[in-house]
Image: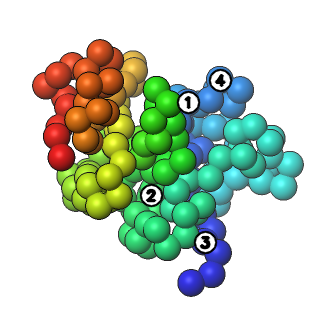
């Protein structure tokens, strides 16, 4: 398989990832994002646009073809650190990550013995007003996240 390209996917430009510089947040897409993709692609800024690559692009065959963010409902990042631990991070492209995608991510986390930190976007009066972190992983990870995440939101391997 060759290098992957975004194609029709604009999930990272739709505000699911936060960027103060580009004024991105859930419910507030980049002003340069069009139905055809980025209107300023050739002159887009280094940070965050050129620098960011979701795992579907960056990791090639690590993620199946149907895990492209616009198809899976999640932007996955495999190269993240959280409290000095390597983790998989997943951000929904809506209110929450679809169950089928979340189950695949949990299986990936188990198989690779790496924690999964994922989000649920919070809605109030039809508008996004923040997110809640949820975790899935081995006991050392769970010990660290229980300080930052409600214990009911931690799912064990």
- First of labels 2, 1 by sequence position: 1
* Residue 6, percent from left and from top: 60, 63
Q: In this rendering, is residue 55 above or below 116?
A: below
Residue 140 x %, y %: 29, 33
Q: Is residue 156 left or right of residue 73?
A: left
Considering every residue shown, the one lying at the far bottom of the view is 1
In the image, 121 versus 86, the foreground residue is 86
Which residue shows up at 64% across the image and 75% down it?
3
In this rendering, the label closer to the viewer, 3 or 2 = 3
Residue 27 image point, x, y percent? 47, 31
Q: Residues within 10 Å of mark 1 (few under 14, many from 20)?
A: some
| Residue pointed to by mark 4 | 20
Q: Which residue is mark 2?
A: 70
Q: Do the residues under discs 1 and 4 have CB atoms within 8 angstroms?
A: yes
Specify the label residue 4 is tagged with.
3
Real-space Cα separation, disc 2 to disc 4, in angstroms: 22 Å
Local crowd at mark 3 within 10 Å, few (<14), some, or many (≥20)?
some
What secondary structure is marked by label 1?
loop
Secondary-structure class at tag 2: helix
Asked whether the beta carbons under mark 3 and mark 2 sit within 8 Å of each other, the answer is no
Please tell me whether residue 77 is drawn above or below residue 72 in the rendered image: above
Q: Which residue is mark 1?
A: 18
Q: Give the distance between the C-alpha atoms of the residues marked 2 and 1, in whole angstroms.
A: 17 Å
- Looking at the image, tell me whether mark 3 or mark 4 is earlier in sequence order: 3
Tell me the residue at 26%/42% (across/down): 137
Q: CA distance from mark 3 to mark 4?
A: 27 Å
């Amino acid at each position: 398989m060759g290098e992957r390209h975004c194609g029709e996917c604009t999930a990272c430009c739709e505000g699911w990832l936060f960027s103060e510089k580009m004024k991105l947040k859930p419910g507030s897409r980049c002003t340069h994002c069009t139905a055809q993709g980025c209107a300023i692609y050739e002159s887009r800024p280094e940070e965050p646009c050129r620098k960011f690559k979701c795992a579907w692009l960056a990791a090639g065959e690590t993620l199946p073809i149907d895990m492209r963010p616009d198809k899976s409902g999640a932007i996955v990042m495999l190269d993240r650190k959280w409290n000095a631990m390597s983790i998989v991070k997943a951000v929904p492209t809506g209110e929450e990550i679809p169950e089928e995608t979340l189950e695949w991510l949990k299986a990936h986390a188990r198989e690779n013995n790496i924690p999964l930190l994922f989000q649920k976007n919070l809605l109030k009066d039809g508008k996004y007003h923040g997110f809640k972190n949820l975790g899935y992983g081995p006991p050392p990870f769970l010990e660290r996240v229980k300080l930052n995440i409600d214990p009911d939101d931690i799912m064990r391997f």
